[in-house]
Image: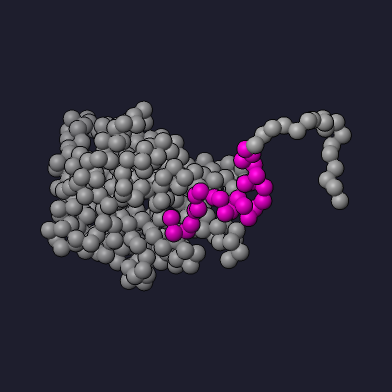
Amino acid sequence: EKPRLPVGTPEVEHIGIRKRPRRNRRGPAMREMFAETILSPANFILPIFVHEGADDIPISSMPGVSRLGVDTGLLREVREAYAVGVKSVVIFPKTPDELKTPTAEECFNPSGLAQRAIRNVKREFPDVVVYTDVALDPYNSLGHDGIVRSDGVIMNDETIAYLCKQAVSQAEAGADYVSPSDMMDGRVGAIRDALDNAGFTQVGIMSYTAKYASAFYGPFREALDSKPRMPSDDWKVEPNKKTYQQNPANWRESLLEAKLDEEEGADILMVKPAMPYLDIIKGLSDNSNLPIAAYHVSGEYAMLKAAALNGWLNEKDAVLEALLSIKRAGANVILTYYAVQAAKWLREDQGL
């Protein structure tokens, strides 16, 4: 039967349009064939928050995400992720308050929470790729990524000394990649040397290359209780991290950071956050031959989840579009709290 036209459709003469891009979008088989970007569970790294104890502790600002017991929920979560094709995780420890100090020595404790979490995962799932977080803020009683001087200055080189010890302790526990998120100058080269000198030449570095002083980190800092602390009468503490994280106004600065990290031995370059910084992802992808990672951060997750819970967005469609845009911009590694759910959706679409 010939398709019918709505009443009122105008009659038009043939229009001489020779090139019609819509021809290649007419049907699903064509759209699938000509797709320029393919999203896969293999692209995802699942961030996992761990804590002492056995119970899951929900994070109020991240519905569906919890702190997981290092000996219980952690392994359950990794098992579920692995079953749907997500074979990479990054570990973030919620350090007990009594172990936090102004110099954060707990970060390189061989029996520390992060180190135990790494060993647990590698023991049960040796094929899972384990990434870590190298920074002092989860262990620092003042809440900063580096050691804080009494005048509020975040000390660069002194911080690096402990970052190196932290990275080596994580490698000893079995980490595949260490991931410096601190944004201290020169830390990638120092960590590379420390790993090599300790015999860990095969352990990679995923550098937080372009980490911006963003408003989108709020739920993460609730998850780890790692936001900067209030100053005391005799110790100044900056309320934000703008002296070491990048200015959201700057693009070219990220190219400098990428050049330095690449020269210092980074194996992967990361942009954080992701969606508000797609131009930065594209810039790094265009200017480096290294793999590019992007962190779809807690605030991005929280926005999508809140809109979905209120019925304002179709969660599946919005999430997969968001993740696709990150990959399209040039990131073939995506850290996202939606990793497991997105992998399930992708498998459903493939009839798996």
The answer to whether 296 appears left or right of 3 in the picture is: left
Q: Quadrant of the C terminus?
A: bottom right
Residue 186 percent across, percent down from the top left: 18, 42
- Residue 51, above or below 307: below
Q: Quadrant of residue 182?
A: top left
Give the residue drawn at x 38%, y 58%: 89
Query: In the depicted view, which residue is nearer to us: 72 or 11?
Result: 11
Give the residue drawn at x 34%, y 45%: 270
The answer to whether 142 appears left or right of 37 in the picture is: left
Does any portion of residue 153 appear in the rendered image?
A: yes
- Residue 87, above or below 190: below
- Residue 86, above or below 311: below
Residue 55 percent across, percent down from the top left: 44, 61
Q: How is colour applied across the structure in the image? A: one colour
Residue 333 percent across, percent down from the top left: 40, 52
Query: Residue placed farthest to the top in the image?
Result: 249
Give the residue drawn at x 12%, y 58%: 197
User: What's the magenta region?
Assistant: 19-43
Does any portion of residue 147 appear in the rendered image?
A: no
Query: In the depicted view, which residue is nearer to us: 27 or 271?
Result: 27
Q: Quadrant of residue 137?
A: top left
Give the residue drawn at x 32%, y 57%: 131
